[in-house]
Image (cartoon, rainbow, N blue to C red):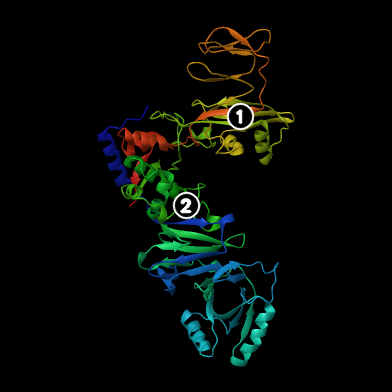
């Protein structure tokens, strides 16, 4: 049963929690870094624009601007080879497709004029002097400021221009700068370099002027954009913004904007908790959370809706805690009628993730047929080898009817998949929940006057006109016709090479059921009652 909360008691709990608990700056970060393009989706180049222009700089006890960019659009790309095709620049595999006669290829080899400078103003002063001599240099920032020229494809080509420069800049030291794809070029829309910098020296950031929106590859975002070097040589694109601004872009992707207000508010609190608890989840890649379902789906300003923004604003700063600490607010689409204890899914016991009844609407039903080959292929892809599949059955269930062990017997051994590993191995979109039954081998479908009925059989059975199943004798195979109690003999009821998984629910069944939250809101429950129902022994508190 749902945990009923007396209004007076609830008000007292909130009053006490709001006055006795607060998060300091170290506890709840006010901004968050979201990986928009990372790992295999890291890019060689990205476009940035803002209606009022951009500023490039970094934070160090305040915002330190370095470049003001008034261009309509800029391109930020790794310092590599690019082929100019009618004004569009594509990364070019120069090492494997050398074309010494193509003048439309830009390269990552440069010439440094003079030495290094401690300040931008010193470097800029020298660069302006060089311009008066008919040379077009640009600034480079690699710890210190430098003045570079050229985008050469080979060291030899750079040296040819090197000799030409010496006749103009007779008393200036010059050095050829070798290829290094960890550097980043910032160019205008014609491909001309504005400046080059190295992300390894800090979190350099592009910010829109006057708090305007950022346009990144024709998609709008709040906050700024950071680029870092990815392990595959491309660039990781990161959106840094305030946590609640991030939630604006999360909520409509995690719950329909047409959902009731109280359900959206419950989802806003759950999503905020997730962000707070999982800060630094992708720290090795230089950001906090990714933008995919691996973390929380985030699509920036382009995804925002008025109803979901209001849900974030109306719960601003609210966090669920257990014993004074923010909780991991796991949530899922549909529990199938009852949520689960955390230890029954992922193994770890959380005092606030306990199974609760969730009967506020009809559960989601699903059914899927897998062949023996489908199952064997899935096992093989994860390193399990059992040979030809002989049998598949449930080995253990939880008190809330989730399958905790799935036993797969083969000609060369037996594998037992446990808990979440069942869905992981067979596929999260294949086995939609752990509340399922397996219909296998002799499966009879009775089509009668009323409704179809499917039954899993391990021996020889028959179904009579009232849909009762009983075992036949003498190893004979029969089926009733569904309208009479007379047996109709069949030649055989053959064993099948397929297994039908029939289940209810969608997701891991931990914490809040989104479908259940919507149903509760439609029944008049408030967002705090929804949260207190799905999470056990928690307090709703505000960050001050």
Kind of element beneath mark 2: loop
Q: Are marks 1 and 2 in contact (CB under 8 Å)?
A: no
The crowd level at tag 1 (other Cα within 10 Å; few <14, some 14-19, many 20+) is many
Query: Which residue is located at x 47 percent, y 17 percent?
Result: 450
- Image coordinates for residue 313, horizontal then vertical, percent: 32, 50
In the depicted structure, whether residue 415 falls above or below residue 51: above
Give the quadrant of residue 264.
Answer: top left
Q: Position of residue 16 (x, y in %)?
A: 29, 42
Residue beneath the point at 59% across and 33% down:
418
Q: Quick one: SS at disc 1?
A: strand
**In front here: 484 or 187?**
484
Q: Which residue is disc 2 drawn over?
A: 279
Above or below for 456 versus 48: above
Q: Is residue 152 above or below residue 125?
A: above
The percent coordinates of residue 160 (x first, y second) are 67, 84
Q: State the quadrant of the N terminus.
A: top left
- x then y, percent, for residue 509: 48, 34
Q: CA distance from mark 1 to mark 2?
A: 34 Å
- How would you rate the neighbour count of disc 2 (Cα within 10 Å): few for under 14, some for 14-19, many for 20 or more? some
Kindly give the residue lying farthest to the right in the view shown. Answer: 412
The label on residue 406 is 1
Picture quadrant where residue 32 is located: bottom left
Frontmost of labels 1 and 2 is 1
Residue at horizontal 40%, vertical 70%? 53
């Amino acid at each position: 049963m749902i945990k009923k909360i007396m209004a007076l008691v609830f008000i007292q709990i909130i009053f006490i929690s709001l006055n006795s608990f607060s998060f300091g700056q170290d506890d709840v970060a006010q901004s968050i870094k979201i990986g928009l393009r990372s790992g295999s989706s890291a890019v060689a180049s990205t476009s940035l624009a803002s209606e009022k222009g951009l500023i490039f700089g970094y934070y160090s006890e305040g915002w330190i601007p370095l470049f003001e960019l008034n261009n309509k659009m800029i391109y930020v790309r790794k310092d590599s080879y690019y082929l100019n095709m009618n004004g569009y620049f594509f990364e070019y595999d120069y090492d494997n497709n050398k074309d010494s006669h193509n003048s439309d290829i830009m390269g990552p080899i440069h010439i440094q004029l003079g030495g290094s400078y401690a300040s931008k103003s010193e470097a800029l002063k020298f660069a302006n002097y060089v311009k008066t001599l008919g040379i077009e240099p640009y600034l480079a920032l690699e710890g210190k400021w430098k003045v570079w020229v050229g985008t050469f494809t080979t060291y030899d080509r750079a040296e040819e221009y090197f000799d030409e420069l010496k006749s103009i800049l007779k008393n200036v030291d010059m050095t050829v700068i070798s290829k290094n794809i960890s550097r980043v070029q910032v160019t205008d829309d014609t491909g001309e370099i504005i400046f080059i910098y190295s992300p390894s020296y800090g979190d350099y950031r592009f910010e829109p002027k006057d708090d305007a929106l950022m346009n990144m590859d024709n998609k709008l975002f709040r906050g700024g954009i950071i680029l870092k070097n990815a392990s595959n040589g491309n660039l990781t694109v990161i959106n840094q913004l305030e946590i609640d601004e991030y939630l604006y872009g999360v909520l409509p992707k995690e719950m329909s904007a047409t959902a009731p207000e109280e359900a959206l508010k419950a989802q806003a609190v759950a999503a905020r908790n997730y962000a707070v608890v999982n800060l630094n989840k992708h720290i090795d890649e230089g950001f906090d959370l990714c933008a995919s379902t691996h973390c929380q789906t985030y699509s920036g300003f382009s995804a925002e809706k008025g109803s979901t923004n209001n849900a974030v604003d109306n719960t601003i700063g609210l966090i669920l805690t257990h014993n004074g600490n923010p909780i991991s607010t796991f949530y899922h689409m549909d529990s199938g009628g009852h949520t689960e204890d955390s230890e029954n899914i992922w193994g770890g016991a959380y005092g606030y993730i306990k199974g609760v009844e969730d009967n506020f609407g009809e559960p989601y039903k699903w059914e899927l047929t897998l062949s023996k080959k489908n199952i064997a292929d899935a096992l093989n892809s994860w390193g399990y080898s059992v040979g030809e599949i002989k049998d598949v059955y449930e080995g253990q269930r939880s008190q809330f009817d989730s399958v905790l062990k799935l036993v797969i017997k083969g000609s060369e051994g037996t594998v037992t998949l446990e808990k979440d590993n069942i869905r992981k191995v067979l596929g999260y979109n294949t086995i939609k929940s752990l509340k399922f039954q397996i219909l296998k081998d002799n499966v009879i479908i009775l089509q009668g006057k009323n409704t179809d009925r499917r039954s899993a059989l391990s021996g020889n059975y028959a179904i009579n006109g009232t849909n009762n199943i009983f075992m036949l004798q003498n190893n004979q195979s029969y089926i009733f016709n569904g309208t009479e109690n007379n047996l109709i003999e069949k030649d055989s009821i053959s064993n099948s090479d397929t297994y039908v998984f029939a289940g209810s629910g969608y997701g891991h069944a931990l914490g809040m059921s989104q479908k259940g939250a919507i149903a509760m809101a439609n029944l008049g429950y408030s967002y705090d009652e929804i949260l207190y129902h799905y999470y056990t022994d928690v307090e709703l508190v505000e960050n001050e």
